[in-house]
Image: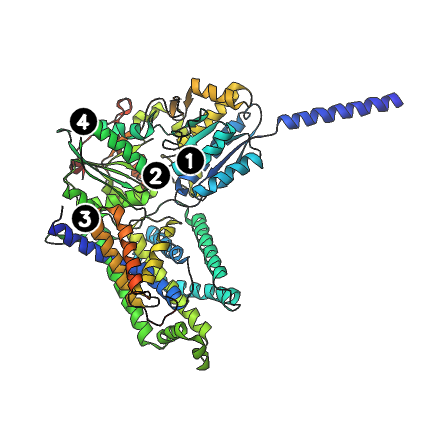
Amino acid sequence: MKIYKLITNMLVAVAFIAFAAVAVAKEPIKIGFSMALTGGLAGGGKQALVAIEMWRDDINSKGGILGRPVKLVYYDDQTKSSNVPGIYAKLLDVDKVDFVVSGYGTNLIAPAMPLVKNRDLVFMGLFGMSNNEKWKHDKYFQIMPSGPDPAVDFSRAWFDTIMQLNPKPKTIAFVAADAEFARNLKEGAVKNAKRLGMKIVYNKNFKPGTPDFTPIIRAINATKPDVVYVACYPPGSAGMTRAVSEVGTKAVAFGGGMVGLQFAGIMKGLGPKLNGILNYDFYVPEPNMNLYPGVKGLLKRYKKIAPSRKVDPLGYYLAPWAYAYVQILGDAINAVGKIDHAAIAKYIHKTEFTTVVGKVKFGTSGEWAYPRTLTVQWQNIKKQADLQQFTQPGIRKIMNPAAFATGKVKPFNSLR
Amino acid sequence: MFSLELFLNALVIGILLGGFYAALSIGLSISFGLLDIVNIAHPAFIILGAFVCFMFNSAFGFDPILVGVAFTPIFFILGNLIYRIYYTSFEKTGATALRGLAFFFGVMFILEVALSMFFGVDYQMVRAPYIDYKLEFGVVDIPFRMFVPFLVALIMTLGLQYFSSKTFFGRAMQAVAQDSFALRLMAIDPAKIKRIAFGISLATCSVAGALFAIIMPIEPSIGRLYIGQVFAIVVLGGLGSQNGTLIAAMLLGLVESIITTFFGPSWAPAVAFSALILVLAFKPTGILGRAGDTRG
């Protein structure tokens, strides 16, 4: 009788140990990040969060990472860079996350860099401009397809495009919002203009929150530039577009680094005023964008979720890229087979990933090995307040890079 | 680069811009200037007004300014309610300074989060037939997008000035700012006057919100960019003076426009705020502030 009891107890003990082992094995892999869910960049931040959650659901439905489910741990940074270091310290020391990825945007990536460098962690960046230039962190990887020299490469395609105009433009005016991302963009664009031997006739910054841009457009017009390069955030982009519609310009190209023209609310509000603007973009509903495998399906699913989450209803600007930066991390961890930051970073450096934004290969600095920022020109917009038209091809035709091109650049005023 | 055409256009846009700044600041000149309530949430209430206009504009096509005017009574009631809370929790106990400021910080955050939850965080724009048109007088252009808000702001500011100088409640508002104890001796409840005045101050946010939405895209937290500007205008104008606020707003608009045109936009805020310091150095009570006003 005693032997039976002993055997029963032993079986119970073994079962308990086995159960505990399974429970440990199934403990989730935690990925932590800060995200702008309120404040000026919340439009992008919330869009990114929806895409990251879609990836989490996708990967978990396939068995997770290393056989463990993925759990996201995130906090709202309120678009304040001062909140970021504290959030990442909490994620690593209190929440004990296995990996951290960045929030959205240059200004909110920068404050996390010292900590991730100090802890020697793999750090995926979401739309940062030259964040690793100072830190040279060998485990930093950034998903925006700016190229190895981000500030310069970002506008390279735009300058290549304007050089297709006949006659070639010789003079240029620069105007940018007085904020880090826009200033970096402008500095890179200035280098491109100098490379092409263009004469700079106007080069100024304006404060964020400027309500009216007609004095700026008039001052630019007085310098008679052939082209105007604008680098600014959504309120500035909308203001500049309205101002150039009211005042007019003789420049043959206008745009470049106008953030926000890709957002549904602004596209809808500006409508035909966008015609002719030559700007950067990352994804547009043009036929040649089928080179991005799975992106159409992703955006179709995103559009169903967007209304209930009150985020950008189209999701073209950020959703595919937010999905891709965690997709790469997940693929790399699975490929390495263990949580080893050094090995994972090494794997990411040497691998060309196939993602929802196509093939992605990182260079030594953690930026894309080659630039793939699109230059698009707004054309054929007939109506205001009609969002549906922006889901059709032919509205934002791709001018550059050549592999994606769906149209040829036309002088600004010929499309007005 | 100087030309008469540039100068005239800069002048016109500066005046129009000043009108817009006056609309943003006029309510604060009552709450901060007259009632001594540091309502740091004032721009957030303007954005609330802007989103109300956006909601009715996008759903029914209503004119934003009409919506703004129609909602002034609602904002007035809201102002009354907020002042009741503020009065009971802070003013009555004499804890108005730092705790009152914290209260309005809290109100600002609550408003922003509520707007984010209800409208989302994307930038939104309103539509109105006049937004795309402009008047041309020779070399001078007057965009309706700026002119209509200027007219509305002017009417609102002058109306408020008339109200505060010619009506019983208006005079009582002035009196409560000068000597609320004397008001009590005349059997008038200063708290009631202040409640009504605060309601009026918030009612202006409804109209100012409509003007804001006409001029630029809105998102729940965009009001933060204007906190410094509206307080600066009220101080520059002279605490409690609506006419002073209008003049200060015009001055700021003109300086910004002219500096932007001829010296570059990055100089505009520096020069505008230098003008503020200069005026306050020579006249610490602001442009039309009273000499005996110790709050200046």
Mark 1 is surrounded, within 10 Å at the Cα level, by few (under 14), some (14 to 19) or many (20 or more) other residues, namely: many
Q: Which residue is mark 3?
A: B262
Does mark 1 fall on the same chain as mark 3? no
Q: In whole angstroms, how far apart are the C-alphas of marks 2 and 4?
A: 30 Å
Amino acid type at image mark 3: Phe
Tag 1's secondary structure? helix
Check the picture and name the quadrant holding the N terminus of chain B: top left
Query: Which is closer to the viewer, label 3 or label 4?
Result: 3
Q: Is residue A109 visible?
A: yes
Q: Are marks 2 and 1 in contact (CB under 8 Å)?
A: yes
Q: Is residue B129 visible?
A: no
In the figure, is residue A395 to the left or right of B175?
left
Tag 3's secondary structure? helix
The subunit letter for the residue under badge 3 reads: B
Q: Residue furthest left?
A: B138
Q: Which residue is mark 2?
A: A180
The subunit letter for the residue under badge 4 reads: A
Q: Nearer the viewer, residue B22 or B257?
A: B257
| Mark sitting on residue A164 | 4
Tag 4's secondary structure? loop
In the figure, is residue B128 to the left or right of A23?
left
Name the image colouring: rainbow
Does mark 4 fall on the same chain as mark 1? yes
Q: Residue A128, how many percent across, how many down?
A: 38, 33
